[in-house]
């Protein structure tokens, strides 16, 4: 048993990548490739650094020379392996400059190859993927109001006119958030009813009881089965009334719709083009897959959307640079004096020595840890307020925010003492050219700290991931206190999915540490390599055997991964440039100036070459899939396939939902008779009939009066036309 407990390792590597994509999806497979990219970048860099820079640094003897003048100088073996052991102005620094170019070129080469591979994987995945509703559907937002037509009619007529050969149907979006809350509440009550019904079946001689208060904790005792039956019946009536109100109230329809097309080619044309000469209306984009839709944000109008994102940008700045302010405030309240002042009744308890020791020694750290645990939830809430309509977009946006937080408060915060706000104030008071030098001079001194950080946060985090002790404890707690039915047990045993918004920014932090310290203190690199190697192995196993991905975005997050690695690379170059200035290598630093410029140029090349493949769907590929589908499935009814795909979940299966239909005449005519044109046509026809009647009356009058006398020339309505 003990000899075989590591058999999961070769099993995790045995599954080929195409099978992994088929099993877990492209998102999961590309996520694992991020760790593989780390190995591709840092394994050769580690070998080169240990073969060139470590001997150069170790034989520098700068500390020995300094120790002659300063008896109190202390240093360790790690310091002797860093650039700090090279004397200022030494020609040995040219070796570091050359290796900076080599490391940058290798990193760019690995990034370009990986970008190309992931792009091919995405295109192949989209080409080989089974039929999905989002391939035929476009999300249309900011539909302009119309006095004569409802939003549904307006959408139908607009796309029948502008996409007459490809428009199929559409589904308007309802503001059903209140109804969704009722549905969730009803499921909770039904779960309680199932629990008490099962309890009564096990013991028929005793009817179960409950209290009418919150969670049955207080209130009068009542029969539990009758109580929850009445609650469900009352809520069902409210739910039905709310559903009728939503379906029949024009104000409940938000200015957005899911528009479906007869072909992928038609959907691609609509999603990737501007629909109106006013760029703020009829905004089209690819619809997320139905599992990926975040329904609550579909109702947000365009102007409010921009305002929300502006406010959240300000809030993110405050959270990043001022997050220690509320923590310091809470920790101040958590000391002995503050508790005695604001909670005097706890004074006898606080005076106990063991309690006092816990408050003074552990409570501030616990408060900080709780905040850091809640931080991803706070960041995700900010992204939801910004108004993104897909869960994948919410996680990608949250990952960007979390990475900024780690960059400022973990990396820069560990290098420069003080809070992030104090760091920012100190940097702003300096000349911009002195900022890299200020930060760069502190980097070698923090190598030991970051080695410890990689082992504690990285290595132990991977060990916790494979052991899954926290989910195991949480499951047993839920099973003991919360599980009442089999449905509760299934929810408690849900393994979850990859926490992209948390894990990806942490990966980027290790990329940043490796790139920064590759030319400064190469001894850090083996710890980074070990982290990426074990992470690749562990997460490949987790994706195959544990996690169940909730949606599939087709690896649309990869451009963000590439961009953040480039940011880390450029940042490392600026910090190394500042460090060389402290080494008085003024002439040598000129050789480094082109490096960040070339790196940014490389980023622009990759962006222009590959990024469009992650934002748009090529019309050529769309036509190929449509042609193949028509040949293999000539009798496919795509309208039936799509009709329920983007119906709000609260309406599915509950009511025969009224869907817009495509009229045959509208499919055949390039111009569709809308209400406005109907009014004009009807008014013109009525006026024509009135003029014809008037002309006939005039002709009769003139013939009765004039006899053979020539009357006035009569111009009929037909003559006018």
Image: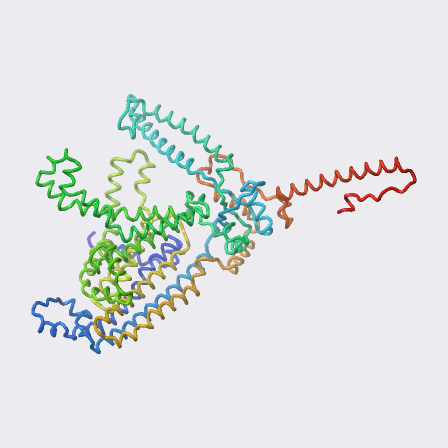
Q: Is residue 151 above or below residue 197?
A: below
Residue 143 relative to residue 474: left or right: right
Q: Quadrant of residue 525?
A: bottom left
Specify the color scheme: rainbow
* Residue sitting nearer the eye, 393 or 415: 415
**Residue positioned 13% across, 41% down in the render:** 337
The answer, for residue 540, to whether it is visible in the render is no
The answer, for residue 355, to whether it is visible in the render is yes
Q: Position of residue 82 (x, y in %)?
A: 19, 69
Q: Position of residue 681 (x, y in %)?
A: 68, 43
Q: Position of residue 695 (x, y in %)?
A: 80, 39
**Residue positioned 20% across, 77% down in the render:** 90
Residue 269 relative to residue 665: left or right: left
Residue 492 relative to residue 276: left or right: left
**Residue positioned 19% across, 63% down in the render:** 447
Q: Position of residue 300 (x, y in %)?
A: 44, 45
* Residue sitting nearer the eye, 415 or 634: 415
Q: Residue furthest top?
A: 205
* Residue sitting nearer the eye, 628 or 172: 172
Residue 717 relative to residue 490: left or right: right
Q: Is residue 356 above or below residue 464?
A: above
């Amino acid at each position: 048993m003990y000899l075989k407990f590591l058999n999961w390792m070769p099993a995790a590597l045995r599954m080929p990548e195409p099978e992994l994509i088929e099993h877990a999806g492209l998102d999961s497979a590309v996520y694992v490739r991020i760790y593989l990219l780390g190995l591709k970048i840092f394994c050769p860099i580690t070998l080169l650094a240990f073969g060139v820079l470590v001997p150069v640094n170790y034989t520098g003897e700068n500390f020995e020379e300094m120790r002659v003048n300063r008896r109190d100088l202390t240093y360790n073996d790690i310091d002797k392996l860093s650039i700090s052991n090279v004397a200022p102005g030494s020609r040995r620094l040219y070796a570091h400059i050359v290796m900076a170019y080599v490391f940058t070129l290798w990193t760019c080469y690995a990034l370009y190859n990986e970008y190309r591979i992931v792009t091919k994987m995405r295109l192949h995945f989209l080409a080989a993927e089974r039929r999905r509703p989002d391939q035929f559907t476009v999300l249309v937002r900011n539909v302009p109001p119309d006095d004569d037509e409802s939003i549904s009619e307006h959408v139908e007529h607009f796309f029948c006119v502008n996409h007459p050969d490809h428009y199929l149907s559409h589904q308007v979006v309802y503001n059903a958030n209140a109804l969704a809350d009722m549905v969730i509440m009803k499921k909770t009550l039904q779960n309680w009813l199932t629990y008490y019904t099962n309890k009564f079946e096990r013991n028929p001689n005793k009817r179960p009881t409950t209290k009418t208060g919150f969670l049955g904790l207080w209130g009068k005792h009542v029969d539990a089965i009758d109580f929850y039956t009445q609650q469900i019946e009352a809520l069902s009536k409210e739910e039905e009334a709310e559903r009728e109100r939503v379906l029949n109230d024009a104000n409940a329809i938000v200015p957005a719709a899911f528009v479906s097309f007869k072909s992928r080619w038609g959907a691609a044309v609509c999603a990737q083009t501007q629909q109106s000469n006013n760029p703020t209306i009829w905004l089209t984009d690819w619809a997320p897959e139905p599992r990926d839709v975040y329904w609550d944000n579909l109702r947000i109008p365009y102007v409010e959307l921009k305002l929300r994102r502006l406010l959240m940008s300000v809030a993110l700045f405050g959270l990043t640079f001022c997050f220690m302010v509320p923590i310091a405030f809470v920790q101040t309240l958590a000391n002995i004096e503050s508790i005695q002042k604001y909670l005097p009744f706890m004074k006898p308890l606080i005076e106990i020595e063991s309690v006092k020791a816990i408050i003074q020694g552990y409570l501030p750290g616990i408060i900080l840890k709780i905040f850091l645990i809640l931080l991803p939830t706070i960041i995700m809430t900010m992204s939801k307020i910004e108004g993104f309509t897909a869960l994948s977009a919410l996680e990608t946006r949250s990952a960007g925010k979390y990475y900024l937080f780690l960059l400022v408060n973990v990396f820069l915060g560990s290098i420069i003492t003080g809070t992030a706000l104090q760091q920012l104030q100190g940097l702003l008071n300096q000349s911009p050219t002195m900022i890299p030098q200020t930060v760069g001079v502190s980097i070698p001194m923090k190598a030991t700290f970051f080695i410890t950080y990689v082992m504690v946060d990285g290595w132990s985090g991977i060990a916790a991931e494979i052991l899954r002790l926290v989910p195991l404890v949480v499951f047993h707690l839920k099973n003991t206190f919360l599980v009442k039915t089999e449905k509760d047990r299934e929810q408690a045993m849900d393994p979850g999915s990859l926490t992209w918004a948390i894990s990806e920014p942490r990966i980027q932090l290790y990329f940043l540490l490796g790139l920064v310290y590759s030319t400064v203190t190469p001894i850090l690199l083996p710890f980074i390599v070990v982290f990426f190697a074990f992470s690749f192995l562990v997460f490949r196993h987790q994706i195959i055997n544990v996690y169940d991905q909730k949606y599939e975005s087709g690896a649309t997050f990869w451009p963000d991964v590439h961009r953040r690695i480039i940011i880390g690379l450029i940042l490392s170059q600026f910090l190394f440039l500042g460090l060389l200035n402290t080494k008085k290598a003024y002439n040598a630093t000129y050789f480094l100036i082109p490096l960040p410029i070339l790196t940014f140029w490389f980023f622009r090349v990759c962006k222009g070459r590959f990024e469009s493949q992650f934002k748009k769907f090529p019309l050529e590929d769309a036509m190929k899939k449509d042609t193949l589908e028509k040949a293999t499935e000539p009798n496919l009814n795509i309208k039936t396939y799509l009709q329920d795909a983007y119906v709000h979940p609260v309406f599915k299966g509950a009511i025969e939902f009224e869907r817009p239909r495509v009229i045959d005449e509208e499919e055949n005519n390039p111009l569709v008779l809308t209400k406005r044109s109907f009014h004009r046509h009807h008014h013109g026809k009525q006026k024509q009939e009135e003029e014809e009647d008037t002309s006939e009356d005039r002709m009769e009058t003139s013939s009765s009066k004039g006899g053979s006398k020539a009357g006035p020339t009569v111009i009929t309505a037909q003559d006018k036309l």
